[in-house]
Image (tube, helix red, strand yellow):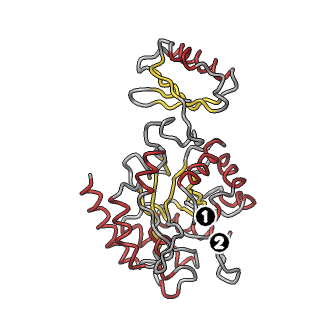
């Protein structure tokens, strides 16, 4: 249930209403916009008298929300959420360019790529230290050493770092990471999501390989319901009958997620296609359909990459793409 308060509602009366609702055992999510304040009621609202609340002189309207996700719901929070990482803002008209290698391989590699993508226009650095791989024999990442190398690259370039966490037990290692990424395979690892809700760091949540948008939003709800409102949704392609590309990039998810939720939505065209030459057209399409950012794999030597070299752009290719993305965004604005 949501209660929309009038613009000039008396603050003392607002506080009285909130205290009364909390006394009924309800959680209250307060969203203060430029023109109105919205109270999102979380819990068993069946005992709430809508007519009584609607009759109060500070209340503009009352309505029930049938969606099972509440905190992420745009009805609860009409204004776009903006996730801030240092000077970088994501959402609410702010566009983030996240780039870097699939996996951190060495200090020389990650620093070289970090400098290249920054020069091209990226404002966040991605790189995998812990790598979930389909085969147990594939490179699994440098783990703690990889995190240290990312910190070195951040010191060299000033770029905040984005890297994937796979297990609750590894959380202490991520204290100094700027954005924690939850990969597609962990989208419904609810124990991890709840811990990230209490961890207090921004979370980049990727859609699962065969998950619906509602399931993605419910996973985000786990994080937000545990206290963390800094969540970024990521569309990275889903499994379909496509036989020429790694996945199918569901670009229709971007405007639909914006309609359903106030959270920023970014797109990963690298994992969606699995083919480097397919990344630029999909990245441009993502920018055109209203994405709040792109996360793209860039490697200085893709042929010899230890992970996902086939989908990685070279630094010079990424630089050309950034200029085209900027042109597309200027056109749609």
Farthest residue to the right: give it.
169
Residue drawn at x 65%, y 26% is 46
Return the x and y of residue 180 as percentages of the image width and height. Answer: 59, 58
* Residue 279, numbered circle: none
Q: Which residue is mark 2?
A: 132
How many angstroms separate mark 2 from mark 1 (CA)? Answer: 9 Å
Foreground residue among 5 and 209: 209
Disc number lying in front (2 or 1): 2
Total marks shown come to 2
Up-down relation of residue 276 to residue 169 (above or below): below
Residue contact between numbered discs 2 and 1, judged by CB atoms under 8 Å: yes
Residue drawn at x 55%, y 49% is 231
Up-down relation of residue 172 to residue 194 (above or below): below
Q: Quarter of the image containing the N terminus?
A: top right
The answer, for residue 98, to whether it is visible in the render is: no
The answer, for residue 315, to whether it is visible in the render is: yes
Residue drawn at x 46%, y 16% is 9
Q: Which residue is mark 1?
A: 164
**Which quadrant holds residue 171?**
bottom right
Is 264 placed left or right of 332 in the picture? right
Q: Residues within 10 Å of mark 1 (few under 14, many from 20)?
A: many
Is 202 placed left or right of 252 in the picture? right
Q: Earlier in the sequence, mark 2 or mark 1?
A: 2
Foreground residue among 149 and 84: 84
Per the image, label 1 sits on a secondary structure element best described as strand
Farthest residue to the bottom: give it.
303
């Amino acid at each position: 249930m949501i209660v929309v308060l009038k613009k000039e509602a008396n603050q003392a009366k607002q506080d009285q209403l909130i205290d009364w609702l909390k006394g009924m055992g309800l959680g209250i999510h307060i969203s203060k916009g430029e023109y109105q304040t919205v109270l999102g009621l979380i819990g068993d609202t069946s005992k709430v008298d809508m007519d009584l609340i609607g009759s109060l002189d500070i209340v503009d309207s009352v309505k029930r929300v049938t969606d099972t996700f509440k905190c992420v719901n745009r009805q609860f929070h009409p204004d776009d959420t903006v996730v801030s990482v240092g000077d970088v803002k994501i959402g609410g008209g702010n566009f983030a360019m996240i780039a870097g290698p699939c996996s951190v391989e060495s200090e020389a590699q990650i620093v070289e790529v970090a400098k290249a993508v920054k020069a091209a226009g990226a404002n966040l650095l991605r790189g995998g230290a812990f790598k979930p791989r389909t085969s147990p024999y594939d490179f699994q990442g440098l783990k703690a050493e990889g995190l240290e190398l990312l910190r070195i690259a951040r010191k060299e370039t000033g770029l905040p770092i984005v890297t994937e966490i796979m297990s609750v037990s590894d959380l202490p290692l991520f204290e100094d990471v700027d954005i924690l990424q939850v990969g597609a395979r962990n989208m419904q690892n609810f124990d991890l999501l709840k811990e990230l809700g209490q961890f207090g760091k921004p979370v980049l949540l990727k859609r699962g390989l065969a998950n619906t948008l509602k399931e993605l939003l419910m996973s985000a709800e786990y994080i937000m319901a545990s206290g963390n409102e800094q969540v970024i949704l990521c569309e990275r392609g889903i499994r379909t009958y496509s036989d020429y590309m790694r996945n199918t990039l569901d670009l229709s998810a971007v405007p639909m997620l914006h309609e359903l939720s106030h959270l920023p939505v970014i797109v990963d065209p690298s994992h969606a296609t699995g083919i480097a030459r397919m990344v630029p057209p999909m990245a441009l399409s993502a920018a055109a359909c209203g994405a709040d950012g792109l996360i793209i794999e860039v490697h200085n030597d893709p042929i010899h990459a230890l992970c996902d070299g086939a989908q990685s752009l070279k630094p010079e290719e990424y630089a050309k793409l950034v200029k085209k993305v900027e042109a597309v965004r200027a056109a749609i604005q």
